[in-house]
Amino acid sequence: MQVKKSTRIRKEEIVQAALEVVGGKGVRALTIAAIAESAGMSEANIYRHFSGKDELFSALADFIGSSVMGNAATIAAEGRKPIEKLETIFFSHIKIIAENPGIPRFIFSEDVFLGHPDVAKSLASRIGSYVETVSVVIAAGVREEELKPEISPRETALTMLGMIQFTALRQTIGVLNSDITVESRKLWGNFLKLIC
Amino acid sequence: MQVKKSTRIRKEEIVQAALEVVGGKGVRALTIAAIAESAGMSEANIYRHFSGKDELFSALADFIGSSVMGNAATIAAEGRKPIEKLETIFFSHIKIIAENPGIPRFIFSEDVFLGHPDVAKSLASRIGSYVETVSVVIAAGVREEELKPEISPRETALTMLGMIQFTALRQTIGVLNSDITVESRKLWGNFLKLIC
DNA sequence: ATATAATGTGAGCAACTAATCACATGAGGC
DNA sequence: GCCTCATGTGATTAGTTGCTCACATTATAT
């Protein structure tokens, strides 16, 4: 029998285990049995701490949302130059994705946005504010004449996030010939030439 | 009882039915039962024409690959100016996605690249040549001085495809406030400012 | 016209999934 | 020390999924 721990701790462990399952074998493989095995506990014990898969999905979405999306907002609030902020946002996002492939898989999983509409709504809202955050930084860059005056902040932000997302996707699929950090450096170098 | 048709025709019908299921309810819902219902035949009859889900996935991948990815190559081979080619590739890709949401869902589905490695390999190869095709057009644009000389063709191509993919993703998730064609026009307008 | 092979189908099987339940056990208040 | 309740678990259930099979039907070659 397992050592007994408080629900609060077990919840964290279970969410972490779930994220590992997603990273390793995809959202499709995110079964209660797989989570239980990854967390080293019985299936029934999962239900001691979560009412069901829905609640678990919500917890996972909250964890990802707060740890990843909040990141950009924090960086954007710092007092440096717009271009430096963008660069920091870009590379920290890439780093998070590289270290934890389960995150992009979960966020853009159809199991989430087709199977758990409330979770999807919350994630969509977070993506929206992420775009908004980056847009504001780009707008500041244009105002301070670091970036080309004719570019549109919102569309440029979407282009930048698309670049990140596509990189994550290519990594997941395995079509990335070089390392993701090398690839992302090349992409960022080119993006700078596009926006300046 | 159904009217009897040749395997060749039935295969096409089944693939089409499968694509409709994916577009409507996602790859997760792509069960034999769902396909059979959408195609208006019994489950057992599916197995008369496909050995199993693997073969069906391969057929779906081939259909999508040849009808979508081949599109770009055709456009690129025409005799117009590079920028016009890029624009045509961009908007026809968006159009295909808009008309058939099952396509991007399937291509980037984890059920494919985690559950059917051989299909994933074939799709990855097609994506690779798609990137290559666009890169070549961009390189031509640079050479003919339509595009900025300092941009890197490959990375710019990846950025453009990321923009498309991210748009498809946002449409699928439902975070696209405006119509996808309106949104894509805005994105293209801005992209032109970035690359020229 | 008849034979034959291809096509179509309801019934059902084994494996898997989410969830429940009765029962065991141990941590913490007293 | 012991009581109590939160925590942990094996067994089980109802539902789903991919797939098979015996049997029905029809296109088609001869």
Image (cartoon, coloured by chain):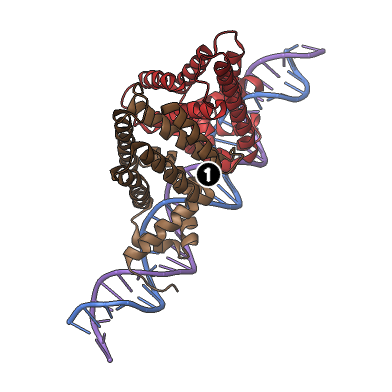
Chain colours: A red, B brown, C purple, D blue
Q: Position of residue A28 (x, y in %)?
A: 48, 39
The picture quadrant where one finds residue C13 is bottom left
- Chain letter behind tag 1: B
Residue at the spot x=62%, y=24% of the render?
Answer: A11
Relative to A20, residue D24 above or below: below
Q: Residue B3 vs residue A83: left or right?
A: left
Q: Position of residue B44 (x, y in %)?
A: 41, 62
| Residue closer to the observer: B101 or B41 | B101
The picture quadrant where one finds residue A144 is top right
> What crowding class fits label 1: few (fewer than 14 Cα within 10 Å), some (14-19), or many (20 or more)?
few
The residue that label 1 is drawn on is: B181
Q: Quadrant of the C terminus of chain B?
A: top left
Q: Can I make out residue A102 in this image?
A: no
Q: Residue A29 vs residue A115: left or right?
A: left
Q: Helix, strand, or loop for circle 1? A: helix
Amino acid type, callout 1: Thr
Q: Quadrant of the N terminus of chain B?
A: bottom left
- Picture mark count: 1
Q: Residue A35 vs residue B68: left or right?
A: right
| Residue closer to the observer: A190 or A145 | A145
Residue at the spot x=55%, y=18% of the render?
Answer: A142
